[in-house]
Amino acid sequence: MESLIIVYSYHHQNTEKVAKSIANVLGADIKCPDDINPERLQNYDLIGFGSGIYGGVHHKSLLELVDKLPGVTDKKAFLFSTSSGGEANTKREKYHLLREKLESKGYLILDDFHCKGFFGFRGLGLNRGRPNAEDLKRAEEFAQNLKKSVE
Ligand SMILES: Cc1cc2nc3c(=O)[nH]c(=O)nc-3n(C[C@H](O)[C@H](O)[C@H](O)COP(=O)(O)O)c2cc1C
């Protein structure tokens, strides 16, 4: 199974840590949105899209990438993200924009992983140490389940 993870993680590399845990299980390549040639995605059986949550949505570089992708038929994909607010974000309508865009291109979203990530600003720190070992273990289990459902 050829897998690719597309991740944008800039604030504290929180989401990159999750991407690496998932990639280790899947044996996936990891790339950032700017390095993606949309035509080459057809070589992959499973594609993960992830970033921190900024202003309630995934990073705009991911959203813009998906706008440029050609249509597909039921190509398997998954989502992942980190945020300071955690699960509460996933209950909000705009959090699902990335999923909606991918589904409108014909992607089949198998699952979505989310955990808290550290947010530091002017000496304030929320969720210090997150994602932690337990979060990353959950990310690995998430990837094991994905692997089972695709193979
Ligand atoms: C500009 C900016 C906007 C953010 N907006 C949100 C938000 O709307 N909701 C939330 O829960 N966290 C928000 N956060 C916190 C990040 O989602 C969190 O720190 C995340 O783990 C960052 O991921 P990264 O280190 O992979 O970039 C924001 C952080 C930044 C820097």
Image (cartoon, grey):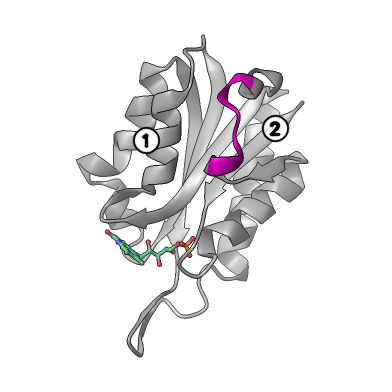
Q: Amino acid at mark 2?
A: Ser
What is the residue that sits farthest to the bottom in this orientation? 123
Q: Which mark is residue 87?
A: none
Instruction: Residue 83: give x, y in percent of width and height.
Output: 38, 61
The quarter holding residue 54 reads bottom left
Q: Is residue 35 magenta?
A: yes
Instruction: Give the magenta range.
Output: 34-39
The quarter holding residue 127 reads bottom left
Instruction: Residue 126: give x, y in percent of width and height.
Output: 36, 78
Q: Is residue 117 magenta?
A: no
* Residue sitting at x 64%, y 42%: 143
Instruction: Residue 78: give x, y in percent of width and height.
Output: 52, 34
* Residue sitting at x 57%, y 71%: 132
The residue to which callout 2 is attached is 3
Crowding at dot 2, Cα within 10 Å, few <14 / some 14-19 / many 20+, comes out as many
Seen from the viewer's position, the closer of residues 67 and 125 is 67
Q: For ligand 1, which image quadrant applies? A: bottom left
The residue to which callout 1 is attached is 98
Return the disc, 1 or 2, that comes first in the chain's sequence: 2
What is the residue that sits farthest to the top in this orientation? 73
